[in-house]
Amino acid sequence: MIQNVIRAIYERIIEDNNNITIQYVNEEMAKYLEQFDQTWIGYEQIYVLELMLIEADARLLITEAIEVDKEIMQVEQREKARGRIVVDTAEFTERRSKLI
């Protein structure tokens, strides 16, 4: 886009050298650069929003896994208190403690 603008301004300068001023060139470039900047800002806003959504989704999965593990631990403790057999090995306990 910007290359096309520069090319068009350059062609106008060549075609009509007497009527094109530096001020005109600066104003034209400023106008198109402002449009480009606004377009870029819009892109960045969408990009950052998408990153935030991805992060929130990832965090949600981790949070859900932690909650499920807590529920499993509560069930195991409740069943143990009732005298029922639950998984209780050193390897299982060690792996669980690493996850928490």
Image (cartoon, grey):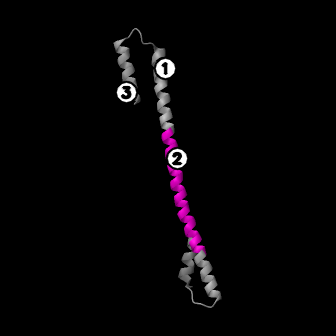
Labelled pair 1, 3 in contact (Cβ < 8 Å) = no
Viewer-closest of 3 and 89: 3
Using the numbered discs, state the Cα–Cα distance from disc 3 to disc 2 in whole angstroms: 29 Å
Left or right, 22 with reference to 8: right
Where does the magenta region start and end?
A: 42-70
Compared with 80, 43 (above or below) is above
Determine if residue 100 is in view.
no
Residue appearing at x 49%, y 20% in the figure: 27
Q: Would you identify the image quadrant in which residue 4 lies?
A: top left
Left or right, 18 with reference to 53: left
The quadrant of the rendering that contains the C terminus is bottom right
Q: How far across and down, in percent of the image, does residue 59 sit?
A: 55, 60
Residue type at numbered disc 2: Val
Residue type at numbered disc 3: Asn
Residue type at numbered disc 1: Glu
Left or right, 58 with reference to 13: right
Q: Residues within 10 Å of mark 3 (few under 14, many from 20)?
A: few
Q: Report the residue marked by disc 1.
A: 27
Residue appearing at x 52%, y 60% in the figure: 58
Q: Report the residue marked by disc 2.
A: 48
The quadrant of the rendering that contains the N terminus is top left
Tell me the chief SS of the magenta region: helix
Using the numbered discs, state the Cα–Cα distance from disc 2 to disc 1 in whole angstroms: 31 Å
Viewer-closest of 95 and 10: 10
**Secondary structure of residue under mark 2:** helix
* Among numbered discs 2 and 1, the one appearing first in the sequence: 1
Q: Report the residue marked by disc 3.
A: 4
